[in-house]
Image (spheres, coloured by chain):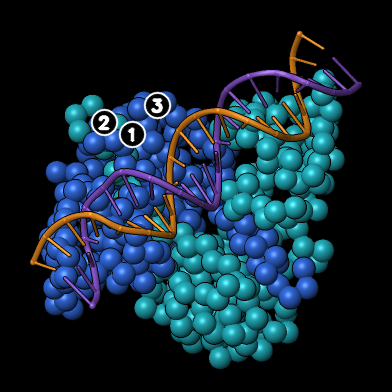
Chain colours: A cyan, B blue, C purple, D orange
DNA sequence: GGATGTGAATAGGTTCACAGCG
DNA sequence: CGCTGTGAACCTATTCACATCC
């Protein structure tokens, strides 16, 4: 089996969330066009994505909601959930902390260089000084980190995280990060995203 | 000229930010391979993207930093900056407010359904009740909105915004939105993004 | 010589369209 | 029938490679 694309993984994650919702409504079966409608994509796309997980539905009755959800989970989830850390407890960091705490993918530890922000519990998550990062990443088997630090520090912090054993970064600093091939980074550049929306919004306005 | 792709627009926005940094360091000239290195892409990609803006560099001396920045600005920026609103003043909304206030693309008004959060100024931005949305969107000529509301309300709020004249949405609710063809929506699904990073981090770990 | 600009080749992702099945 | 699974076609995006210019 060849490598599954990043876009397919994103959509599978979304399908699973929808499937969980259907499960809680006691829906048993779902068609590709149902998933396509709510995910704003096409039935063919849904079927392609599901091919990648190896699950097969049945003609006539579509996909079994529970089985498909489980198949996607088998693909996406680690046997034991990966540890996740947050670095940078500023406004954005705290919001991300509250967003992710209490979910399946939860944050095990948060770090900041500012002593005022550390050595306390925020949204149920312990906050540590940066100096403790290597020890805690190692002890808690943290393999993923969310970066919410200023641009100037992002690469340096990323290097320390990778050094400590982190393999995946979700980067909110507006800087493309340099990481080795055995690590993965996804950058969410909020300013770029907003400029893009503004550009296309203008293009679609009555008088450009 | 054919339509410029969303990916090219994102990269141009990034190039411009780099160029601004170079300008403030009094750098005059830049090569495609310089931009490529810091943006983690290829020189050919940079040159293709710059083709889209219609600017030409010179062989031997590369691109003029100031002129290229201005050319990108001519493409990306509206003659008069588009008004931007934020809807949803929860943890994430407040963080986005503080992130975007004081930038070139600044938020003109914020909205929330909770009366406790409205009728005050937050990070320098006035907060209004949802009932005032149509009037203020219209009066302030707001054409872009950032959605930071719970999933259950997102489509409904989006519909109201579009109705009021908004043409672009930056959506943080974990729900794909249905919008007409004369509007643009970019969804940033934080949970999906984190699951994607976790998946690829695991794939790159020593023992998958 | 070492850049840019760009047609052509390639890779990647999506959609079509249809065989096959219950 | 109306669905799934999938080869093939298509479309989009990236990279190559080279003519061109200072």
Side of B199 relative to B135 (left or right): right
Both labels 3 and 2 in a single chain: no
Residue at (45% x, 72% y) in the render = A177
Q: Disc 2 marks which residue?
A: A205
Q: Where is residue A126 in the image (x, y as percent from the top left)?
A: 63, 77
Helix, strand or loop status at disc 1: loop
Closer to the observer: label 1 or label 3? 3
Question: What's the mark number on residue B181?
Answer: 3
Q: Which one is in front, A188 or B43?
A: B43
Q: Where is residue C2 in the image (x, y as percent from the top left)?
A: 24, 75
Q: Position of residue B204 (x, y in %)?
A: 67, 69
Residue at (26% x, 31% y) in the render = A205
Side of B25 relative to A116 (left or right): left
Helix, strand or loop status at disc 2: loop
Q: Report the Cα–Cα distance between label 1 and label 3.
A: 10 Å
Chain letter belonging to callout 3: B
Both labels 1 and 3 in a single chain: yes
Q: How many discs mark residues in the rendered view?
A: 3
Q: Which one is in front, A6 or A191?
A: A6
């Amino acid at each position: 089996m060849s490598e599954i694309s990043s876009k397919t993984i994103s959509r599978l994650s979304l399908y699973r969330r929808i499937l969980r919702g259907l499960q809680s409504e006691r829906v048993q079966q779902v068609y590709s066009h149902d998933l396509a409608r709510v995910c704003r994509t096409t039935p063919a796309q849904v079927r392609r994505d599901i091919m990648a997980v190896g699950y097969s539905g049945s003609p006539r009755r579509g996909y079994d909601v529970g089985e498909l959800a489980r198949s996607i989970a088998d693909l996406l989830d680690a046997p034991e959930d990966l540890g996740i850390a947050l670095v940078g407890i500023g406004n954005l960091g705290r919001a991300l902390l509250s967003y992710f705490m209490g979910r399946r993918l939860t944050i095990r530890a948060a770090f900041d260089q500012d002593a005022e922000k550390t050595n306390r519990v925020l949204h149920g998550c312990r906050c540590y000084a940066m100096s403790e990062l290597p020890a805690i990443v190692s002890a808690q088997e943290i393999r993923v980190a969310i970066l919410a630090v200023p641009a100037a520090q992002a690469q340096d912090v990323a290097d320390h995280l990778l050094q400590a054993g982190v393999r995946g970064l979700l980067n909110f600093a507006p800087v493309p990060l340099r990481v080795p091939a055995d690590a993965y980074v996804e950058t969410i550049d909020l300013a770029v995203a907003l400029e893009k929306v503004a550009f296309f919004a203008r293009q679609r306005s009555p008088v450009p």
